[in-house]
Image (cartoon, rainbow, N blue to C red):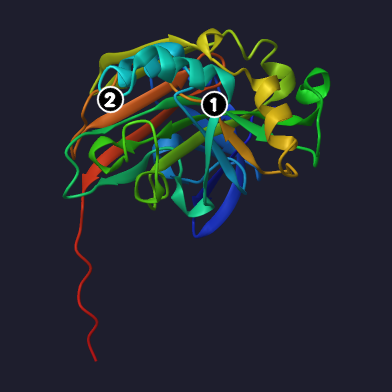
Amino acid sequence: MRQGRVVYGGAVHGCTPLGHPGAASGAQQLRLADGRVLEETQVQWLAPFEPRTLYTLALNYADHATELAAKSSADQATFLKAQKTEPIIFLKGPGSVVGHHGLTRRPADAEFMHYECELAVVIGREGRHIPRAHAFDYVRGYTVANDYAIRNFLEPYYRPNLRVKNRDGGTALGPWLVPREQVPDPMNLRLTTHVNGKLVQEGTTADMIHDIASLIEYLSAIMTLSPGDVILTGTPKGSVDVQPGDEVVCEVQGVGRLVNTLVADWTPAPLGG
């Protein structure tokens, strides 16, 4: 069963969807664990589980790698060959996560900030040195991610760094954790992003350079994977600059529809005393 987490009435509740989750029609109802039925806009959404370490793939879709290689000084053939040899992976802390209908700040000095619609793989069992053939035995389920990037903060385009990928609220997750059994072929799912209702990104998980099983095998050869760990598997091409006030909707076929809104940066008030 699909599961989510929300805040309502000052308390955290588990919830499940009513009707078809992720329908293109938009808003839906949800049922709290105590039986109350609410509209999705009546609650504050959290990530659908408590995230632990986030492992994030850079340029794991061939079309997106080509898109950004063309903007860098690297030789494209050498660049793409390196991508296929070994995945580029970096870590994110749980403080970077915001839920469905959450707000993400655009830094005041951002020159180009874009969404990244991704299939997120949630680990359900502890494992080390997991063979590819048994990789999915360690998957709890899937959710949708929108992992924002700020291009002028990258050093260079293909090397994500701390201030790009670990900003508070820079990664939206949700709304639902979908059990592994309900997604029989995660390597054949359509991904789309709409900004203010306009389709700006479209792709399929079939175009990943490094597939889910190989990523689990690779990561678990380096470190122990634990329940609550998340693998953000990358995004297809289609980078459009987004501004405060823009509504960004990322959808992964059969997994869910994740809504996020950009807001302007803010300057902390000086400490008084």
Horizontal placement of 207 versus 69: left or right? right
Quarter of the N terminus within the rendering: top right
SS at mark 2 in the image? loop
SS at mark 1 in the image? loop
Tell me which numbered mark, 1 or 2, is placed earlier along the sequence: 2
Horizontal placement of 214 versus 80: left or right? right
Nearer the observer: mark 1 or 2; the answer is 2
Quarter of the C terminus within the rendering: bottom left
Instruction: Mark 2: give few (<14), some (14-19) or many (20+) Cα within 10 Å.
Output: few
The relative height of residue 223 versus residue 11 in the rendered view (above or below) is above
Give whichever of 232, 22 is nearer the camera.
232
Q: Which residue is mark 1?
A: 233
Q: Can you give x and y, in whole percent of width and height, for residue 22 in the image?
A: 48, 20
Give whichever of 80, 36 is nearer the camera.
80
Q: Which residue is mark 2?
A: 72
Quadrant in which residue 230 is drawn: top right
Q: Can you give x and y, in whole percent of width and height, for residue 137 in the image?
A: 81, 26
Say whether residue 20 is visible. Answer: no
The residue lying at 31 percent from left, 28 percent from top is 248
The residue lying at 25 percent from left, 18 percent from top is 197
